[in-house]
Image: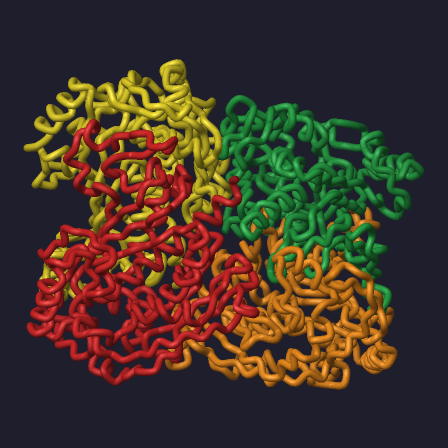
Chain colours: A green, B orange, C red, D yellow
Amino acid sequence: MAGNIFGDIFRVTTFGESHGAAIGCVIDGVPPGLMLSQVDIQKDLDRRKPGQSEVTTQRQESDTVEILSGIFEDKTTGAPLALLIRNSDQRSKDYDALKDVFRPGHADQTLFQKFGFRDHRGGGRSSGRETAARVAAGAVAKKVLSPHHIQIIAYTKAIGTIEAKVVDLAFIDKNIVRTADPSCAEQMIKRINEAREQGDSVGGVIEVMVKGCPVGLGDPVFDKLEAKLSHAMMSIGATKGVEFGAGFGVTKMMGSESNDKVSVDQGQIRTQGNLAGGISGGISNGEDIIFRLAVKPTSSIAKKQNAVAKDGNLTSIEIKGRHDPCLCPRIVPVVEAMTALVIADCLLIQKTIK
Amino acid sequence: MAGNIFGDIFRVTTFGESHGAAIGCVIDGVPPGLMLSQVDIQKDLDRRKPGQSEVTTQRQESDTVEILSGIFEDKTTGAPLALLIRNSDQRSKDYDALKDVFRPGHADQTLFQKFGFRDHRGGGRSSGRETAARVAAGAVAKKVLSPHHIQIIAYTKAIGTIEAKVVDLAFIDKNIVRTADPSCAEQMIKRINEAREQGDSVGGVIEVMVKGCPVGLGDPVFDKLEAKLSHAMMSIGATKGVEFGAGFGVTKMMGSESNDKVSVDQGQIRTQGNLAGGISGGISNGEDIIFRLAVKPTSSIAKKQNAVAKDGNLTSIEIKGRHDPCLCPRIVPVVEAMTALVIADCLLIQKTIK
Amino acid sequence: MAGNIFGDIFRVTTFGESHGAAIGCVIDGVPPGLMLSQVDIQKDLDRRKPGQSEVTTQRQESDTVEILSGIFEDKTTGAPLALLIRNSDQRSKDYDALKDVFRPGHADQTLFQKFGFRDHRGGGRSSGRETAARVAAGAVAKKVLSPHHIQIIAYTKAIGTIEAKVVDLAFIDKNIVRTADPSCAEQMIKRINEAREQGDSVGGVIEVMVKGCPVGLGDPVFDKLEAKLSHAMMSIGATKGVEFGAGFGVTKMMGSESNDKVSVDQGQIRTQGNLAGGISGGISNGEDIIFRLAVKPTSSIAKKQNAVAKDGNLTSIEIKGRHDPCLCPRIVPVVEAMTALVIADCLLIQKTIK
Amino acid sequence: MAGNIFGDIFRVTTFGESHGAAIGCVIDGVPPGLMLSQVDIQKDLDRRKPGQSEVTTQRQESDTVEILSGIFEDKTTGAPLALLIRNSDQRSKDYDALKDVFRPGHADQTLFQKFGFRDHRGGGRSSGRETAARVAAGAVAKKVLSPHHIQIIAYTKAIGTIEAKVVDLAFIDKNIVRTADPSCAEQMIKRINEAREQGDSVGGVIEVMVKGCPVGLGDPVFDKLEAKLSHAMMSIGATKGVEFGAGFGVTKMMGSESNDKVSVDQGQIRTQGNLAGGISGGISNGEDIIFRLAVKPTSSIAKKQNAVAKDGNLTSIEIKGRHDPCLCPRIVPVVEAMTALVIADCLLIQKTIK
């Protein structure tokens, strides 16, 4: 109800604030018998952690995860997995100046009005730091997917007006913006660096592919696969839109264009073009699932902005902390994790039907 | 789990197939003491029902709702409301020709593969007809909103490439495409009629406004208000994307542009521009909530298309039934209903906090 | 949340008041492909319906059920089943005299104080009539159990101080008190008739057996099988206690007595005595599951009693309606239905593990 | 679904095994603004911890709790509370001898068959140790109750055949068996010590009182207050029965006896006798809520017993570990905690109605 639990069967509860003692999660509903080690989870956390490259925040967090429960002799037991990440570089004094000001574009004001309370040390639960717990949970979800050979890949599709045209999956982890288009990477990095130098930030688009998803995931009414994935994606801070397959482009087509052309290939029904993004009537149809996310520019910028103080008066603010000038590179592993949570949950739900 | 229940506290379960005996819903968690009559619900159903105008399907359904429970002396009692709509014009013989063919763009194939079963009489649960039950539930949700003076208004923003520029709310129910721009309505109607005459269909964009929403709805982590609304919107068949405020446009901005400018007006914090779409950090901020939906062209078209038969062979199909050449006009009340369900639920959840 | 939904995967929502238009239920999560007809459900309803025998209320309700959805060609489709029972013999004028009085032993006062509202026509949702919807749902749950050869049998174990000693399952439906002990039935009937003649009522004990339950149902922590069954049982009006296996008797034993003696029979682990009632550590162990319920005497009695009026003054009351002088015979099918709901749900949950 | 989450709004997830790194819980839905410190929680844990007295196990665990999140400046923030208790005295070598044997009366066999897996180090999730996390959560739930002046008190009502007659609440924490009857305590202690000396164990009865509970908690259908409390109680290992008010005794009464006599006292409706146990029609009626639990003798005993080995052969076992010869004294705080979880949850649910 308070919205810190995600999933129906594979159920993740995250906890922790950006400047508290620790963050982490508990996962209930993990099937027994999956091989799982600390390294499997750490690997994914390392892709998300701050301070990786010139285009990310310089905050230093080792983000070392400890598995507290749910594992015996390197296998899941069916008991809940608790994963703990201690906060090391809290530097909440960075936030002392912000104690009485609501940062523009942030949840500071709405959280205060919702809870009647202000935890001014960073964004509290609204901090991007909370997503480390999601990435940890996602690493476990991937263990549910791997026997099905389901692969989830996200990458930066656009930074500002620079749009990738090519999808070369092998390139994604070879460049610090995590684009799949080798011809764009340098331009994108330049664009982000310019933004930072101006004390500003820049937005972008993330694209996600789910390869090898079996037919039949998702439900025909309220829990369509697009609905569950959209819920997951729009629960990531900074996302302002999501679209599947042809997305908003489909609104300008005729039905005779937008219906994917069907064919039969070695007894398998296939669709050409995949304008539907791999989902028909809310249910996976066997093609690659494809969707895109609109990521807004980072709200924390060094440039001077108007802001409202807690006492209701107008003031101005220059945010000094260490912030990502563009969220895309570090959102990639978060998006993959949230996608993994949804697909793992749907796989387990489907077991109750067949 | 099977996805026919929506909401956490205000909880709606829909039932019924397009060509079965009846459709309807049960709503659990309706607060006691709300004035409610059959007419309140019927009024909304009449806005959605088929056969309203030249731009909608000619299927005839009176869509008369009966309240079976939960009301005593014209007030809700706190008991579940059951709402029943008998199907009258079932004409499932229209579908006999489709018995062994999977219609392109529909859920026929995926439902069959998911459940191992084919109910070929119309789309079964995947039929747009199911949304009548949602509209009925939405009419009840609006009763929860009305003491708070919250208003939900949806309208057709675009049909194909024709895009509305003006928002004149009073105009919406004065034109059969339900656009808010008086200068576009005729063109839009013409566009839809052309599509129908060609045996084809056309897509569009719906925009939604929530006026008067109090600050504080939605939660900071998984159940951000955008996440819940996106789940609701993407659970409506034919939607392929959703965006809030500046939406995908935000990806091309700098942070100094996309952060809404704040001001203080008579002691109230206000934002200018409302690029955030009325939601900050997943929580309503007191501005109008604004979002848009991508609606694909109707999948059922009269034009000849390739299709796969149940036996796995390729065949061709011309869909003869009576179908909407554009879904936008009739989706408007569905979108309003689903929005009302989310906002009512969030209001009740917020009562557990304050 | 409002407590009209039961189950995690096999999810039943009941609706309807004793003196409204109809009662019924919607079941979400019914697996596809189960053979099911109206007759299957009606048969169980007939065992519960009023007016069956001299020891039950003389209220006449045909309790005819209509299946509104979820079935195609006599098989479940995976869509929600909606089941409708119209009320025929409402006679709410019987209740006019009770309009301003809270009946002793009933929920009249607590419902009024909880909801700020009084539906004085019978007990509203608190009426035993609501359980007809549970029996209908239970008939569907049994279809989930039957491929596993799981059988659920309940019977009257005691009426007042008359306690059955023998369990002859074949006898249960041959006597109107539904006891399993042929030597007690007549005495029990006599005891109930005496109570009625005195304008009074009498309590009793129901015992339940689940035969053929596979090992592994139930979960080790909050959702122990006893916990879920107890929740189900104690949600039936008039129940004031539940005990498993040796039950309260176990409190007077030593551990060396209460631990079931184990043996191995043809490779199967068996326990002797079954003091655990077929459940070890919250999980079914393969033995018969056995539990008992304390059923209080009917609260509605003809004898004059003190009562509190809605205006807060003390008055007296003689309840004239047509009431069961003992609830046990008609609770038997309700108990079986609720047990079937729990076991079916646990079976489906277990599919997500193995 | 996997049953490690409890509650609807005040939602507790526990994790951890008896012989793993740690146990703990995360609580979602904690209202903001409650004063809470580590000491508040530790105090309750100290009442449950092992090694307190001669009648409890000699296992030594400091059970020191750390609050990881959800608190700022000694107040809850509305964010999830994570509570961590490191295991110190794991001595899993005690269990090496048990590696290949299923302990009688335990969940060893059923867990193995359910999950296809054996964690032989103590009971894993089925260990009583898991209840420390519940006690920690209960201490937080009490903070929700305290502004309402609701008090929850449990005590040992019987040990074997020795039954307490008197209820002197002030005496409970002055004796190591936690009975409320000063005349019984010594006998009860003697009885437990005898059992231990014989290498055996003994059962008992716990009684619980909720004082000051407002009218209106619980719901009229599936979530009757008795149903939710029974679910909670029967989820505690070793409980085999629960009864409310007159409990099983009511089955031998007439309706004219079992209906509580009503009266009006200074404008308040009161019932005399409280045979209903403070709950009418599933909803709290303003009287003390009273219920009792059957607690079986500890399953782990030193006496030689038959047991089945993992290979399916019959063997014998003498359990050497350090075990409570009677569970009652240490179950008392667990029962109070689980009761607090239910009442806190019902209070928050009731806020959505009124």
In the rendered view of the protein, which quadrant contains the C terminus of chain D?
bottom left
Which residue extends farthest front? Answer: C266
Question: Is B146 in front, or is C90?
Answer: C90
Q: Is residue C278 visible?
A: yes
In x, y percent, where is residue A21? 53, 28
In x, y percent, where is residue C332? 26, 61
Q: Is residue B6 above or below residue C324?
A: above
Residue drawn at x 33%, y 63% as measured from the top left: D220
Q: Is residue B270 visible?
A: no
In x, y percent, where is residue C141? 43, 58
Tally the numbered discs: 0
Left or right position of D254 against D232? left
In x, y percent, where is residue C241? 22, 51
Q: Quadrant of residue D40?
A: top left
Residue drawn at x 60%, y 24% as measured from the top left: A38
Question: Is D239 in front, or is B344?
Answer: D239
